[in-house]
Amino acid sequence: MTHPHQQARRAAKAGVATLLLLALGLPAQMLQAAPAAQVQPQRAQDQAQASSFDAELVAFLTAYWANFPDAAVAAGRYAEAARLPAPTEARRLQQIAFAEKWLPRLARLGQSSGLTSAQAGDLLLLDNHLQALRWSLSELRSDRWDASEYNVADAFAQLLNKTDFAPLPQRLKLIDQRLRQVPAYYKAALAQLHEPSPLHLKLAIAQNSGALSLFREDIPAAIKAAGLKPAEAAAIKAHNDQALRALESFIAGLEKIAKQQQLDGSGRSFRLGKALFEQKFAYEIQASVDAPTLFQRALAEKEALLQKMSAYADQLWPQLFAAETPPADRLDKIARVNAKLSERHSAPERFVEDIKAQIPALEKWVVEHDLLTLDPSRPLVVRETPSYMRGVAGASISAPGLMDPKGVTYYNVDPLDKYTPEQAESFLREYNHWVLQVLNIHEAIPGHYVQLLYSNKSPSKVKALFGNGAMIEGWAVYAERMMMESGWGAVDGKASAEMGLMYAKWNLRVVSNAILDYSVHVLGMTQDQAINLLQREAFQSSTEATEKWHRAQVSSTQLSSYFAGFSEILALREQLKDKQAKQGKAFNLKAFHEEFLSHGSAPVRMVQRLMLEK
């Protein structure tokens, strides 16, 4: 994959740098242009300051990996998986101290007059990340009530699977070091929980139970396959057995708490409440609007989509129901048409295979329609979601970190064997012939898979490592719009009303996510109200609605990220179209896509400034 990189301009000439530095509380006068006589000395000074910036960034990342080894593993530094710090109270305070040390240190770095706009943006992202970290550890305190935060499985699984990182015997040495720390980890985790949320307890029990197979089957099998000396193999096996017992004990401890909660009705509510939700939204979404404003926009967009779906339903009704008179109620009419179309779907045993089969067609379409440059050397593997990751979303992407250039991207799909036949049918009707295509665009091509590969090639490590979830989800939703606008789903060259209706329904899902998120955590929406929103007003199947209600309870603000990011990307595209039209320039869609993605996973409002300053 290739993509253009816009060289960063000196902050003295970049209006965006002014905005970013002011956001960091830095003096704007530092950005004034130097007199002509000072150009050469200023250039040398800028180069020195750039070197200082780079050195300080290296120092920050080194300290960060030391304090957050799991984040290092996620970034592709697999050797860090050998360290598994216990989540003690002392460690929480240590992490707060880390944030408080680096916040002023990075702010001082930002006082340099030679910062480029890209560097200023990096500092803004790090400032937000550290502010959010301190707030989360000091005020949100999910470490006390969200038991699902405690799970050691992922790094073990990555070490087992990373054959290109090191030979198996070497990886087992790292695994062995990590295994020795598992008992202390789970002991501290159980001690750290105070009045946990019952729903998060249930999720933690399910996901940690899913991790048992790693210690019962996968690691013992790797020990046997590695050809180790008997004494070394026996030592690793003994440590694995201790880790397994610790995990079993942790699960038993959670089950004991859950049983007691059932008896006395104790436990923290899963709802964040207005103050915590809106502050978390500000840190995580980093949008140009606040949470209440996004909520109101979502309500307005919901009505617009219903009007569009009603028009498609009118168009499709005669061919689906012949001379039958459509219902007078708009929602009933749309529901009837949606239900009829949804009868066309994959067979349960073919669901994962049908997803795999569609990926080449999406790749071909993107290339032939000149929408983006793809990288055929970077594989995408469709797999069943590992059991320790299930219970939140039915489909997801696991992408390699910035420091794992040869890593494989996994498209995780939950198998349907957890469902009864009736539930599986409900699920498949939700992800019918048309919707499944949109899902694959969102998760794979040109959605998450493509965006995250571009992000890892961004010149800014910070924008790739500390990316914004709303930009990432927003791009995936925008990718759906991009594909529909290019003609995907058309029949004989003509727009398909069936795809039009289902794509509008999918957009209604995006909008409903934001409505649900705010309503559940701030407005106290009940289960009955949520199911009514999702099933009657958004036409989702019973299985999908039930699982989305669960997801809204065990997550917060993430469901808002789709609509927030998509809205801002679409608005940016239209801004650039207008700007270039006024300048007499032709708008190039592919160039827009590649320049947008070249800025890593930065918040859309930051990318907007960088692109509009040109």
Image (cartoon, grey):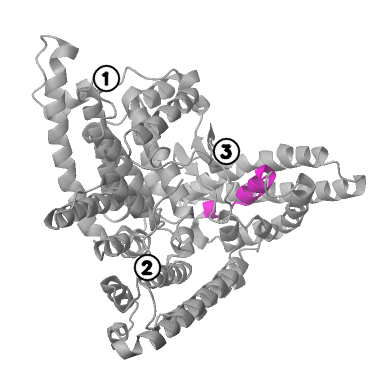
Residue 151 on the magenta segment: yes
Count of marks, rendered view: 3
Q: Position of residue 14 (x, y in %)?
A: 29, 73
Q: Position of residue 460 (x, y in %)?
A: 45, 63
At mark 2, the secondary structure is: loop
Q: Position of residue 478 (x, y in %)?
A: 30, 44
- The reply to whether dot 2 and dot 3 touch (C-beta < 8 Å) is no
Q: Which residue sits at x=46%, y=61%?
A: 459
- Residue 341: which numbered mark, if any? 1
Q: Which residue sits at x=52%, y=49%?
A: 201
Identify which amino acid the numbered label 1 is placed on.
Leu
Q: Which residue in the structure is indicated by mark 2?
A: 8
Q: CA distance from mark 3 to mark 1?
A: 32 Å
Q: Is residue 166 left or right of residue 471?
A: right
Span shown in magenta? 147-162
Query: Sequence-wise, which precedes: disc 2 or disc 3?
Result: 2
At mark 1, the secondary structure is: helix
Q: Which residue sits at x=45%, y=36%?
A: 394
Q: Is residue 111 left or right of residue 98?
A: left
- Residue 386: which numbered mark, if any? 3
Identify which amino acid the numbered label 2 is placed on.
Ala
Q: CA distance from mark 1 to mark 2?
A: 50 Å
